[in-house]
Amino acid sequence: MAWRPTTFLIEGMLDNTTPGKVTGWMRFAGMKEKVTFDLEGNFHRDIRGAKIHLIGGVTDSEPDAEGYMQGFAPHQTGQVGDITAGLPPYDYGRAPYYAELDIMLSNGGLRPLLHC
């Protein structure tokens, strides 16, 4: 089963500043502990090499969250899926490999807040 827990995201941080590796954490309503990530691969070209801060629009008290998030593993491993901010492609060879990007989830989509 594929979870789509964006509705219950409180906050998170994903880091792709090490080529070929994505690590980080996310807090979800309905879960007592942070979910940690240790993934192989990279973000898409628009944010490859970035550290992204995700901000959701919910609190810990979402009524349906606990039932939906039940069984969601608190440590995620494997291959990176499609992680993009929908920005024009930016080849990391033109600048240092790392950057920071704050992203807010709004109406089911990602919206960049700040790109340094």
Image: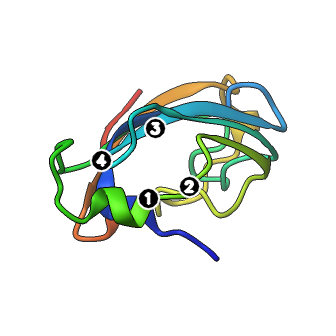
Q: Is residue 98 above or below residue 66?
A: above
Residue highlighted by disc 1:
69
Q: Is residue 108 above or below residue 16?
A: below
Residue drawn at the location 39% of the way across and 35% of the way down = 32
How busy is the neighbourhood of tag 1: few (under 14 within 10 Å), some, or many (20 plus)? some
On residue 35, which mark appears?
none
Residue highlighted by disc 4:
29
Q: Earlier in the sequence, mark 1 or mark 3?
A: 3
**Residue 111 at least partly seen:** no
Residue highlighted by disc 2:
72
Kind of residue indicated by mark 2: Phe
Q: Where on the picture, by quarter, is residue 7? A: bottom left
Q: In which quadrant is the C terminus drawn? A: top left
Q: In which quadrant is the N terminus drawn? A: bottom right
The span from disc 4 to disc 2 (Cα, nearest Å) is 12 Å
Query: Tag 3, which secondary structure?
Result: strand
Residue highlighted by disc 3:
26
Q: Are marks 2 and 1 in contact (CB under 8 Å)?
A: yes
Residue 114: x percent and y percent? 31, 35
Q: Are marks 4 and 1 in contact (CB under 8 Å)?
A: yes
The span from disc 2 to disc 1 (Cα, nearest Å) is 5 Å
Kind of residue indicated by mark 3: Met
Q: Earlier in the sequence, mark 2 or mark 3?
A: 3
Query: Tag 2, which secondary structure?
Result: loop
How busy is the neighbourhood of tag 4: few (under 14 within 10 Å), some, or many (20 plus)? many
